[in-house]
């Protein structure tokens, strides 16, 4: 991305898109009973509450009636249908893990099989987005947290702490390429979860080879433990590589969420919040609901002078439903350098027909 004079002025930035992650399959209901929805009606109402607070993207997981994270796609269909009916404008982004929560007190935190995750392309109603991880990596969600972040909640239990510490994201090339193909075929946007420069480079190569042909919509996932640490150097390094037309949302965990969101907000990027990412306020004097976190970001955006995106603006910015015909068109639309033509060192100057 290129940052020119005035790039920090709100009039030169897009309206802010807030993604809400209120379902939190990695926590158990007793961790925050006031805010973790369990019944289907509670889960639907939570989407309504997030939307009314200012979030236009809903990161969606589902719980069973007993409060456990659901791995049944029929439950996803039910929740998507309910949200569509009550807040039809909201962008529905299904979490690509489905649920990595352990099945019981002695179970393992793990992502579901490739075949099961491919079934996300068969959801009905069709969601707007499914998150797509690229490259198998460690996902140790405990690494950059302190003891106080998990004190008194389930992730502090010895067995659960260990299984979340050892969790892996399985995302090898054959899975990712087939997954993108199936999602695109159904008109579902791949929302890429980019957790370091290597995963971004793989996405760029897939675009150059015509595997993915659509707008580059991505989260920079700075949760450490195999993914980027939440610091300005890693973010800046990522943004140096990202093309100008990419839509970037920043994402972190525990008490890093608010500071990273403020940095992203100032830079003209987009933000994510919710109890999936953090339970506590910044002083750990109390827990903070997803709706409270959204309202906090709306207030801070007001101080920056940056308007909150309407649902229609969010759909236009993210180009929901847009796909391209060729690799060359995808590169040009996203602002990448074109593929090499013949024997040269690469990109030196944009051809005039690409500029027009």
Image: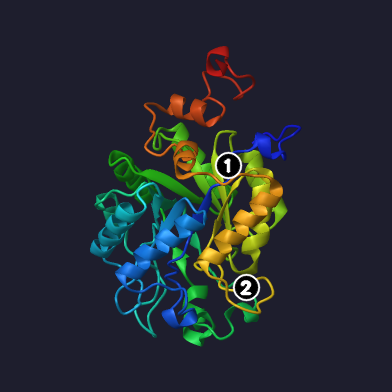
**Residue in view at x 39 percent, y 29 percent:** 324
The residue beneath circle 1 is 15
Contact? badges 1 and 2 (CB < 8 Å): no
Give residue 192's position: percent from left, percent from top: 47, 48
Q: In the rendered view, does 229 fall on the left or right side of 40?
A: right
Residue 136 seen anywhere in this rendered image of the structure: no
Taking the spot 58% from the left edge, 46% from the top edge, the residue there is: 16
For mark 2, does the 10 Å Cα neighbourhood hold few (<14), some (14 to 19), or many (20 or more) residues? some
**Label 1 Cα neighbours within 10 Å, binned few <14 / some 14-19 / many ≥20:** many
Work out whether 167 lies above or below 136: below
Label 1 residue SS: loop
- Closer mark to the observer between disc 1 and disc 2: 1
**In the rendered image of this protein, does residue 152 appear above or below residue 122?**
below
Percent x, y of residue 95 = 40, 58
Report the residue marked by disc 2: 145
Q: Nearer the viewer, residue 193 or 258?
A: 258
- Where does residue 117 sit, x and y in percent of width and height? 32, 57
Asked if residue 166 lies left or right of residue 303, the reply is left
Q: CA distance from mark 1 to mark 2?
A: 31 Å
Residue 168 shows in this picture:
yes
């Amino acid at each position: 991305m290129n940052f020119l004079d005035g790039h920090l002025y709100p009039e030169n930035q897009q309206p802010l898109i807030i993604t809400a992650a209120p379902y939190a399959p990695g926590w158990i209901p007793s961790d925050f009973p006031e805010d973790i929805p369990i019944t289907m009606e509670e889960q639907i109402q939570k989407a309504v509450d997030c939307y009314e607070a200012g979030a236009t993207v809903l990161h969606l997981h589902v719980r069973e009636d007993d409060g456990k994270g659901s791995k049944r796609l029929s439950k996803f269909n039910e929740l998507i249908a309910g949200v569509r009916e009550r807040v039809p404008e909201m962008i529905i982004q299904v979490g690509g893990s489905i649920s990595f929560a352990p099945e019981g007190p002695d179970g393992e935190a793990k992502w579901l099989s490739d075949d099961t995750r491919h079934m996300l392309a068969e959801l009905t109603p069709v969601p707007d987005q499914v998150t797509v991880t690229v490259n198998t990596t460690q996902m140790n969600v405990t690494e950059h947290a302190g003891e106080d972040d998990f004190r008194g909640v389930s992730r502090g239990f010895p067995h659960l702490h260990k299984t979340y510490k050892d969790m892996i994201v399985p995302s090898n090339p054959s899975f990712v390429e087939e997954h993108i193909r199936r999602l695109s075929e159904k008109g579902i946007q791949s929302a890429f979860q980019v957790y370091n420069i290597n995963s971004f480079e793989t996405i760029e190569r897939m675009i150059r080879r015509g595997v993915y042909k659509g707008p580059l919509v991505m989260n920079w996932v700075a949760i450490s433990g195999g993914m980027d640490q939440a610091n300005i150097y890693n973010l800046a390094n990522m943004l140096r590589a990202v093309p100008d037309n990419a839509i970037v949302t920043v994402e972190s965990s525990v008490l890093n969420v608010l500071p990273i969101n403020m940095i992203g907000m100032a830079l003209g990027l987009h933000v994510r919040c919710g109890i999936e990412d953090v339970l506590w306020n910044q002083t750990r004097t109390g827990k903070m609901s997803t709706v409270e976190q959204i309202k906090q970001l709306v207030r801070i955006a007001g101080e920056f002078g940056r308007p909150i995106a309407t649902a229609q603006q969010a759909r236009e910015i993210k180009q929901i439903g847009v796909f391209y015909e060729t690799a060359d068109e995808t590169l040009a639309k996203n602002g990448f350098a074109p593929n090499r033509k013949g024997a040269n060192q690469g990109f030196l100057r944009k051809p005039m027909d690409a500029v027009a």
